[in-house]
Image: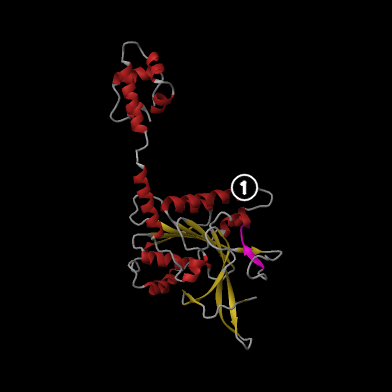
């Protein structure tokens, strides 16, 4: 900051003396030399050493960080932690919430699986239920494929009645179409614009696969670097805004099959490589399964959620559920067999 722009201003005579010594900013006044060295450089008998030290102390006080006592800081952090943990983030199924260790904030959860396994449906469940429970929050859905239909929100809202924010939940779901990385950055920056009465507390990126897959190469690290920087940006966003970020990821072929999964015959894995998985808190794998009766006849299909890796919950655990009319519900029978 230039010394002439500081309010209240320094005496004009002192400003001229300092400028003659090539001291024009607060940083130069505070750090270029000691008060005695500065005093020896200015014109003699123009100002006393005590007056110079007094003005330097005033500039230092203006630039100093605000004082906060330890007990006040503790109470502030405790209140922030209470507000974070008090927020409603749920899929509507306690078994699924426990599987991921709770949809905690701040956090980044990867949802992966093949087509029609319920990836977008799971993210939409969490978003709509949160907006229905918290009328003072908004959500941002970044759609990279153009597949999201607002009609899918209606049955979930009907299941959330009579939560306090259910009437306005749909209006607080912001939708941004983004087909490249720069547009995603712009959407995230707009979500952090100051003065918002309903801050963005949950973000969905559906999906990251078409954004980063073309950038990744076995002969160049540039794409991996861009992906890592972006995920670090998401981490900073989540921590700064106490937000939950759900990242939908596609799949790629897995050879050989992964022996660590509960379903050893699974031939697919999350896309974008193993490095992407370790940039999130939890990786949830969704698949479809069927119930086989005693007579061997296949019954109604249902979905299986499995934690491939997690920092906050047990890995390689699973739960079963069904999606009926767009709403998650429990499965009647937990015996499963992978649907080939």
Residue 272 % position (x, y): 61, 57
- Relative to 26, does residue 122 appear above or below in the rendering? below
Please tell me whether residue 268 belongs to the stretch shown in magenta: yes
Pick whichever, 146 or 302, lies toward us.
302
- Relative to 90, does residue 31 appear above or below in the rendering? above
Classify mark 1: residues with Cα within 10 Å, few (<14), some (14-19) or many (20+): few
Q: Quadrant of the C terminus?
A: bottom right
Residue 76 % position (x, y): 36, 49
Quarter assignment of residue 112: bottom right
Q: Identify the magenta region.
A: 267-273
Q: Is residue 234 left or right of residue 294?
A: left
Q: Is residue 107 in view?
A: yes
Coloured how?
secondary structure
Farthest residue, direction front:
71
Please tell me whether residue 236 belongs to the stretch shown in magenta: no
Residue 215 % position (x, y): 61, 53
Residue 183 % position (x, y): 49, 53
Quarter assignment of residue 44: top left
Q: Quadrant of the N terminus?
A: top left
Q: Is residue 46 left or right of residue 295?
A: left
Residue at 55 percent of width and 48 percent of height: 229
Farthest residue, direction right:
256
Residue at 52 percent of width and 49 percent of height: 232
Which residue does the numbered mark 1 point to in the structure image? 222
Residue at 62 percent of width and 47 percent of height: 222
Q: Is residue 4 in view?
A: no
Which element is circle 1 on? helix
Pick whichever, 198 or 212, lies toward us.
198
Farthest residue, direction bottom:
295
- Relative to 243, does residue 293 appear above or below in the rendering? below
């Amino acid at each position: 900051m230039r010394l002439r722009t500081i309010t209240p201003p320094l005496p004009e005579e002192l400003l001229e003396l300092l400028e003659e010594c090539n001291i024009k900013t607060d940083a130069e006044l505070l750090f270029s030399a000691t008060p005695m060295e500065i005093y020896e450089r200015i014109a003699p008998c123009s100002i006393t050493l005590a007056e110079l030290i007094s003005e330097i102390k005033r500039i230092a006080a203006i630039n100093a960080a605000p004082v906060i006592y330890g007990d006040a800081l503790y109470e502030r952090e405790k209140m922030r932690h209470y507000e974070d943990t008090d927020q409603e983030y749920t899929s509507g199924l306690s078994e699924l919430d426990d599987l991921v260790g709770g949809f905690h904030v701040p956090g980044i959860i990867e949802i992966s699986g093949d087509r029609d396994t319920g990836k977008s449906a799971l993210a939409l469940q969490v978003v709509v239920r949160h907006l229905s429970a918290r009328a003072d929050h908004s959500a941002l859905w970044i759609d990279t494929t153009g597949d999201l239909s607002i009609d899918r929100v209606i049955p979930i809202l009907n299941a959330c009645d009579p939560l306090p924010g259910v009437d306005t939940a749909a209006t607080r779901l912001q939708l941004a179409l983004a087909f490249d990385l720069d547009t995603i950055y712009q959407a995230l920056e707009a979500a952090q614009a100051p003065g918002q009465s309903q801050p963005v507390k949950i973000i969905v990126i559906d999906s990251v696969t078409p954004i980063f897959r073309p950038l990744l190469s076995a002969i160049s690290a540039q794409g991996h670097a861009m992906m890592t920087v972006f995920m670090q940006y998401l981490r900073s966003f989540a921590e700064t805004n106490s937000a939950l970020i759900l990242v939908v990821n596609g799949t790629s072929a897995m050879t050989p099959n992964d022996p660590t999964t509960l379903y050893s015959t699974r031939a697919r894995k999350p896309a974008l490589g193993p490095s992407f998985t370790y940039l999130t808190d939890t990786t949830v794998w969704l698949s479809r399964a069927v119930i086989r009766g005693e007579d061997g006849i296949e019954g109604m299909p249902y979905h299986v959620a499995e934690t491939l890796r997690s920092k906050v919950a047990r890995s390689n655990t699973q739960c079963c559920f069904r999606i009926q009319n767009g709403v998650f519900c429990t499965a009647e029978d937990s015996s499963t067999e992978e649907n080939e």
